[in-house]
Image (tube, rainbow, N blue to C red):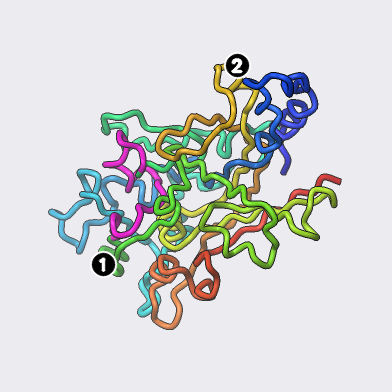
């Protein structure tokens, strides 16, 4: 869905002063790269930010031992309990809907229906209420943050809804009916390649000439815009591909899944009014870019739904790249968002 922000961006393009071309200090304002898609975010239902892996003290004890709760921010582990039936050997896929049903008396799991006036993915609060005991300010962004790269929030990355840490920095402790079913290292690609800032904005790969057949090989640089023959703006259609790779897919599945994908342009008008002039370089550790939500996709189905396969744990399949994704360079589910301008 195109949003009001997309129309505002078009107006900015049409009304920027062409005389800037003659000013060396301002000519870069006219650069077309300022007015393309620059970021993608992932979101879900508002209440979901207080359930699933966000729960600081789990509803079940680890290994059924009352002394093994998940307090103190889970000691750096991503701890999650499944309420799905235990049916060996198919017990290690995290069934989001089973947990939603189990907590239905206090959990409204329906994501916001999209509106053209939306400026964020979820209109309700997405701050984790239980994490209020944490000393730092808990973000309320409308989508998943990336607490791992935030020095103030890093100790609570595993309850705030972060993308997976890079390499071997994150570990999962997965439970079903109180018994451990999976325990392994999470490997996040967004943080490995420095593609997501602390507010969860994943930068778009600005490489030109990417075809729809070769897009998977470019997703290690972030979401891609198809700009080859057949998917060219001159034809009135542009496609954007975004992938949740390996540990990122597993991590978000455990936090309650994905129901929204947001697409953003730079809010150049706002940045210029604050004295920030282009070029707006990407720096995931200290990102001063401001974004405007211009489009979103919303679905009531979890986009990272998964199942066990042949006795192999479903969460582990996602973390390793997924059955069927192993032949792709991006090792993860890819979502294609189509923009038709005609």
Residue at 26%, 29% in the rendered image: 135
| Distance (Cα) linking label 1 and label 2 | 53 Å
Q: Name the foreground residue: 272 vs 325.
A: 272
Q: Residue at x 58, y 57 (%)?
A: 301
Residue 214 falls within the magenta-colored stretch = no
Residue 340's label in the rendered image is none
Residue 336 is situated, as x and y percent measured from the top left of the image, at: 66, 57
For the point 77% across and 19% down, which residue is it?
19
Residue 256 seen by the camera:
yes
Q: Position of residue 316 (x, y in %)?
A: 38, 69
Magenta-colored stretch includes residue 155: yes
In the image, the segment drawn in magenta is: 149-172
Q: Are marks 1 and 2 in contact (CB under 8 Å)?
A: no
Relative to 98, 267 lies left or right:
right
In the figure, 117 relative to 20: above or below? below
Residue 170 found in image quarter: bottom left
Of the pair 263 and 17, the residue shown nearer to us: 17
Extreme-left residue of the structure: 67
Residue 121: x and y, percent? Answer: 58, 39
Q: Which residue is mark 2?
A: 273
Q: Quadrant of residue 308?
A: bottom left
In the foreground, 100 or 263: 263
Front residue of this view, candidates 312 and 239: 239
In which quadrant of the rendered image does the N terminus lie? Answer: top right
User: According to the image, label 1 marks what residue?
Assistant: 180
Q: Position of residue 244 (x, y in %)?
A: 51, 58
Nearer-N-terminus badge (1/2):
1
Binning the other alpha carbons within 10 Å of mark 2 as few (below 14), some (14 to 19) or many (20 upward) gives few
- The secondary element bearing badge 2 is classed as helix
């Amino acid at each position: 869905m195109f949003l009001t922000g997309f129309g505002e961006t078009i107006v900015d393009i049409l009304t920027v002063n062409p005389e800037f071309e003659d000013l060396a200090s301002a000519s870069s304002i006219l650069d077309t790269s300022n007015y393309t898609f620059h970021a993608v975010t992932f979101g879900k239902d508002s209440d979901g930010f207080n359930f699933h892996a966000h729960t600081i003290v789990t509803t079940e004890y680890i290994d059924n031992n009352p002394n093994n709760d998940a307090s103190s921010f889970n000691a750096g582990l991503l701890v999650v309990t499944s309420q799905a039936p235990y049916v060996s050997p198919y017990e290690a896929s995290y069934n989001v809907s089973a947990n939603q049903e189990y907590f239905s008396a206090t959990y409204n799991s329906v994501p916001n229906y999209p509106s053209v006036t939306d400026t964020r993915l979820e209109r309700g609060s997405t701050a984790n209420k239980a994490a209020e005991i944490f000393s730092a300010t808990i973000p309320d962004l409308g989508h998943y943050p990336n607490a791992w790269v935030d020095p103030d929030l890093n100790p609570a990355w595993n309850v705030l809804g972060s993308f997976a840490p890079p390499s071997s920095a994150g570990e999962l402790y997965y439970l079903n009916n109180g018994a451990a079913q999976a325990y392994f290292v999470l490997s996040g690609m967004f943080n490995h390649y420095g593609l997501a800032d602390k507010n969860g904005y994943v930068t778009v790969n600005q490489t030109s000439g990417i075809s729809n057949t070769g897009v998977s090989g470019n997703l290690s640089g972030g979401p891609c815009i198809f700009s080859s023959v057949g998917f060219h703006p001159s034809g009135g259609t542009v496609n954007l591909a975004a992938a949740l790779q390996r540990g990122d897919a597993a991590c978000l599945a455990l936090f309650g899944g994905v129901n929204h994908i947001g697409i953003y342009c730079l809010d150049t008008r706002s940045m210029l009014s604050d004295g920030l002039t282009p070029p707006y370089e990407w720096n995931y550790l200290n990102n001063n870019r401001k974004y405007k939500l211009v489009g979103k996709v919303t679905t009531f189905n979890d986009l990272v739904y998964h199942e066990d396969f042949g006795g192999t744990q479903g969460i582990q399949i996602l973390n390793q790249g997924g059955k069927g994704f192993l032949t792709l360079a991006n090792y993860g589910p890819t979502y294609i968002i189509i923009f038709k301008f005609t």
